[in-house]
Every structure is written in structure tokens, then in C-alpha cells.
Image (cartoon, rainbow, N blue to C red):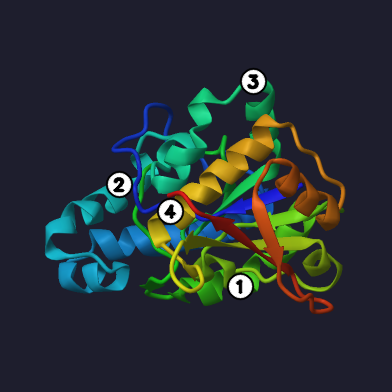
Amino acid sequence: MLILLPPSEGKAEAGTGRRLDLSRLSLPELTPARDEVLTALVALCAGPDEAAARAALGLSEGQRGELRRNARLREAATAPAGRIYTGVLYEALDLASLPPAAERLARRCVLVSSGLWGAVRLTDRIPPYRCPVGARLPGIGALSTYWRRVLASAMVAAAGNGPVLDLRSGAYAATWAPRGAVAERTVTVRVLHERASTPVPTRSVVSHFNKATKGRLVRDLLTAGVRPRSADALVGALRDLKYTVEEQPTVTGRPRQLDVVVTAL
């Protein structure tokens, strides 16, 4: 099983170990692309036009410190990606408290999508950074378009022959869309909050709790040691874990779409 997660805007303040070494990251076929994006980002953030750099990265004037941090990425201390990302999903996943077997499973099956790195394993050592996939970098252009040209072969290889649980947000999902046989083994999840009301319950997507539910869902799968061999088995595992799962009509050659319905936030 391959589990695809989005990164988080919230990140640790600093790394704690050795400097960044792109050659040590997983999916080594992405090294040239990572180096190209990193070079463009560092040059942009170290350059004289602060306003243009902030605009490219969607930063406010009060976030200019992010530019200084990005300018030093090649010399910055690193930490495992699972510690760098600290947002709502990762708080709910709580990697640090996973039992040893669940932690080993997470290392093998989780990939985190990234505007800067393309995709990384939780154990890959990276520095804190700011580079949303919606950014446009000089010489690179739109990152979503750039990675869409680069990622396919690496992601297909990472998926292997097993099911894929795709929990990425829309912007990151645009960097790689599973196709063919991989698509038919892929399951995407939308979290819906159901409220009791008259005459019928109402449902809505709530961003914060969508992320938290996805984090808990991954944690439950890892803790249960789930190793499904098919998309059907993955859907069944979610139901066995007491999630309320509703399937949308399937389309040949497209990922299966699930609604996970929650009543408590």
C-alpha cells in the first residue's frame, strides 16, 4: 500500500542535524528536478526584489523571514520530514507516539507531496522551507505544471502493484494523476461532517477537521497493521476500523472516490 499525504504549511522552526543532501533523499530519480527547483527558489529568495519573491510564494510582508530561511536552505540543518511537517493532519497522525511496528509501516508506505521536493518519505531529512505548490518560480514556472511533467514514473514505481490511498489536497493531487491500472487501484477520500437537522441531516466539508480526520485515519490504518492487497481490501479495512464509508459511482480508469462521514469533530 502507498499512502499519499499533502505537506503542511506549518513546519518545525529548525532542523537539528546535518545539512541538506539531495542525493540521500528517496526517489533518487527526482534529484535533478529537486536541484533545479531548489536553485530557483534560493535565487529568488536571496535576490534583491523582496516584493516579487513574496508575491511568487504568496507571503505577506510580515512573513519576510521565510525568504531569509529559504535563501539558506542548502546550508540549513535538517530533520526527518515526519518531524518537519507539524500541521493539523500531522498532529492527528502523531508519528512520534506510533508503536514501533506502525512506525516501520509508515516509513515504508507513506509519501508526502511537496512543491519543493516533488515527494519525500517521512524519514527523508529536509530543512524547514516555504514553497507552496501554487508558486511560480523564475525559470521554472508553475510548480504544479513542472512536477506533473516529472513525477509520473517515480510515483508509478512507488505505487508498485498495491493499492494507493490518495489523501492529497487538490493542488498537490494535480502534480500526479494516477492513470490506467494504477488509477483503478487508487482510492481518494473526501471527509464530510454530518450535522443533525430537520427534516434531514446536512453535510459539509470543513477544512480543519478534514485534515484531522485524514490524520487519524492514517494513524488507525498504521496502528492496525493493515496491509491491503487491493482497493477493495483497503475500503474494507476502513469499514473494519469503524469508519462510515460511502462509495461514489466508479468510473473505469479513474480512482475510486470515497466519502468518509463523521458526526463528531
Residue neighbourhood size for the residue with mark 2, other residues' Cα within 10 Å, grouped as few (<14), some (14–19), many (≥20): some
- Please name the residue that numbered disc 3 is placed on: 100
User: Residue tagged by mark 2?
Assistant: 72
Spot occupied by residue 107 in the image (x, y as percentages of width and height): 65, 35
Question: Element at badge 4?
Answer: helix
Question: Disc 2 marks which amino acid?
Answer: Arg
Q: Which residue is drawn at 79% across and 75% down?
A: 250
Residue 43 drawn at (x, y percent): 32, 62
Which residue appears at 66% of the width and 63% of the height? 188
Residue at disc 2, secondary structure: loop
158 vs 219, left or right, is right
> Would residue 112 be found to the left or right of residue 70 on screen?
right
**Which residue lies under the disc numbered 4?**
209
Which of the marked residues, 2 or 3, is nearer the chain's N terminus?
2
Query: Which residue lies under the disc numbered 1?
Result: 148
> In the rendered structure, which amino acid carries the disc numbered 3?
Pro
- Residue 220: which quarter of the image? top right
Mark drawn on residue 58: none
- Contact between marks 2 and 1 (CB within 8 A): the answer is no
Q: How far apart are marks 2 and 1 (CA)?
A: 27 Å
Label 4 is placed on what type of residue? Phe
Q: Mark 3 or mark 4: which comes first in sequence? A: 3
Mark 1 vs mark 4: which is more N-terminal?
1
Q: Marks 3 and 4, how far apart in space?
A: 27 Å
Discs 2/4, front: 4
- Residue drawn at x 43%, y 49% as measured from the top left: 265
From the viewer's perspective, is 92 left or right of 151? left
Q: What element carries label 3?
A: helix
Q: Distance between the residues labelled 1 and 4?
A: 28 Å
